[in-house]
C-alpha cells in the first residue's frame, strides 16, 4: 500500500507488448502528430496572414486550431517517447501537468465549438444583426471567456484529483494521465471533487443543449431559403462545424459511458486514441474540405513559401 505523498511516478499503459508493435505505434503516432501540426499550423498561418479571412468564423477557427495543437502536443509526445524507449514512467509532477493541460485544451475546444455554433446561428438566423452581435470586441471577449473558463475548469479538476490520497498503487490504465484512471487509485471519496465533476458535466450538457437548439433553428431558417443555391451555401458553412462537434461528442461519450460488458484493454486503448488523437488531426481537414476561401488562402500561403525557397 502506498499513498500520494510516497508516489514519485506513475506507470502509463503500454501501447503494445512486442518491440515491433511498439515501433509501429511510434511511427503511426509520429505520422498523425506531424499531420496535425502541419494542418493546424497552415490554418493558423493562413487566417493570420490573409486579411479577407479576418472574420468571426475564421477567428474562432484559428482558436480551435490552437486548442487542437495544444491537445495533441500534450498526450502524443510522451506516448511516442515511451514506445520508442520501451518505458512506461511519467513523473508525479509530469502527470499533474499533463492532466491539467489535457483538461484545459479539451475544455477550451468544447467551449470554442459552442461559440462557433453561436456564430453560425447569428450568421444564418439573424444576418442583419451579425455585425452588431459579433463585432471584433465581442469575438475577443467570447474567445477569452472560452480560454479562461477552460483554465479554471482544468485548475479545479487537477487540484481536486491530486489532493486525494492514492493507495491503490501507481499503474494507470491509459497511455496518458486522465482523471478517471487516477481516481481508480484513490482510497477515499471527496465531495468537493464530486461537486466539481457535476458542475463540469452540467456545464457541458448546457453547451450541448445550446448547440442542438441552435442547429434546430438554423435548419428551420435554411429550409425557408427560397433558392437551392442559397440553401446549399448555408448548409456548407454549417456542415464542417456539425461534423467536428459530432466527432468530438460521440467519441467522448462512447469512451466514458460505454457499458463495462464491451470493455477490453485493446478496445479501451483504441477508443482513447480515437477521441484524444484523431480529432485534432481531422478538424483542419474537415474545415478545409468544404471552405473554398480557406483552401484558396492555404494554397496562396504554400505557393508563397515554395517560391521563397
Image (cartoon, rainbow, N blue to C red):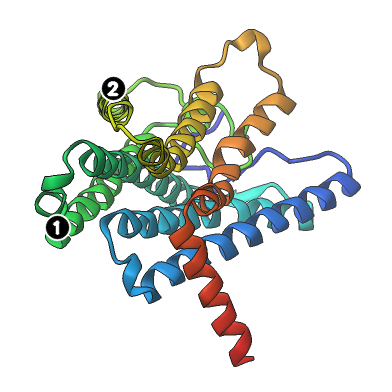
Residue 126 placement, left or right of 218: left
Q: 203 or 1: nearer the eye?
A: 203
Q: 17 or 273: nearer the eye?
A: 273
Q: Which mark is residue 198?
A: 2
Residue 107 placement, left or right of 282: left
Q: 246 or 16: nearer the eye?
A: 246
- Residue depicted at 45% across the width and 22% down the height: 187
User: In this figure, which residue is indicated by the disc labeled 1?
Assistant: 135
The vertical placement of 294 against 17, above or below, is: below
**Alpha-carbon distance for marks 2 and 1?**
34 Å
Where residue 126 appears, as percent x and y from the top left, is 16, 39
Quadrant occupied by the C terminus: bottom right
Q: Which of the marked residues, 2 or 1, is nearer the chain's N terminus?
A: 1
Label 1: state its secondary structure.
Answer: loop
Q: Callout 1: 10 Å neighbours few (<14), some, many (20+)? A: some
Label 2: state its secondary structure.
Answer: helix
Of badges 2 and 1, nearer the viewer stands 1
The vertical placement of 20 against 172, above or below, is: below
Residue 207 placement, left or right of 178: left
Can residue 130 be seen at all in this image of the molecule? yes
Amino acid at each position: 500500500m502506498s499513498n500520494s505523498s510516497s508516489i514519485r511516478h506513475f506507470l502509463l499503459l503500454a501501447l503494445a507488448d512486442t518491440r515491433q508493435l511498439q515501433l509501429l505505434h511510434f511511427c503511426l503516432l509520429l505520422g498523425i502528430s506531424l499531420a496535425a501540426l502541419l494542418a493546424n499550423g497552415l490554418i493558423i498561418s493562413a487566417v493570420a496572414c490573409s486579411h479577407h479571412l479576418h472574420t468571426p468564423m475564421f477567428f474562432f477557427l484559428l482558436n480551435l486550431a490552437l486548442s487542437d495543437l495544444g491537445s495533441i502536443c500534450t498526450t502524443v509526445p510522451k506516448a511516442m517517447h515511451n514506445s520508442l524507449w520501451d518505458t512506461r514512467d511519467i513523473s508525479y509532477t509530469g502527470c499533474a501537468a499533463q492532466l491539467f493541460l489535457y483538461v484545459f485544451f479539451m475544455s477550451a475546444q468544447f467551449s470554442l465549438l459552442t461559440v462557433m455554433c453561436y456564430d453560425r446561428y447569428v450568421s444564418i438566423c439573424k444576418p442583419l444583426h451579425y455585425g452588431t452581435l459579433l463585432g471584433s470586441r465581442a469575438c475577443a471577449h467570447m474567445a477569452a471567456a472560452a480560454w479562461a473558463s477552460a483554465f479554471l475548469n482544468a485548475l479545479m479538476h487537477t487540484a481536486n484529483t491530486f489532493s486525494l490520497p492514492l493507495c491503490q498503487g501507481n499503474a494507470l490504465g491509459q497511455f496518458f494521465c486522465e482523471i478517471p484512471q487516477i481516481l481508480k487509485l484513490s482510497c477515499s471519496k471527496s465531495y468537493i471533487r464530486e461537486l466539481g465533476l457535476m458542475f463540469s458535466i452540467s456545464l457541458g450538457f448546457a453547451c450541448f443543449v445550446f448547440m442542438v437548439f441552435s442547429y434546430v433553428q438554423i435548419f428551420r431558417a435554411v429550409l425557408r431559403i427560397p433558392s437551392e443555391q442559397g440553401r446549399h451555401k448555408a448548409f456548407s458553412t454549417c456542415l464542417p462545424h456539425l461534423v467536428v462537434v459530432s466527432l468530438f461528442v460521440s467519441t467522448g461519450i462512447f469512451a466514458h459511458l460505454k457499458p463495462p460488458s464491451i470493455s477490453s484493454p485493446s478496445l479501451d486503448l483504441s477508443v482513447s486514441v480515437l477521441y484524444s488523437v484523431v480529432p485534432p488531426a481531422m478538424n483542419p481537414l474537415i474545415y478545409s474540405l468544404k471552405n473554398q476561401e480557406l483552401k484558396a488562402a492555404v494554397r496562396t500561403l504554400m505557393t508563397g513559401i515554395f517560391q521563397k525557397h
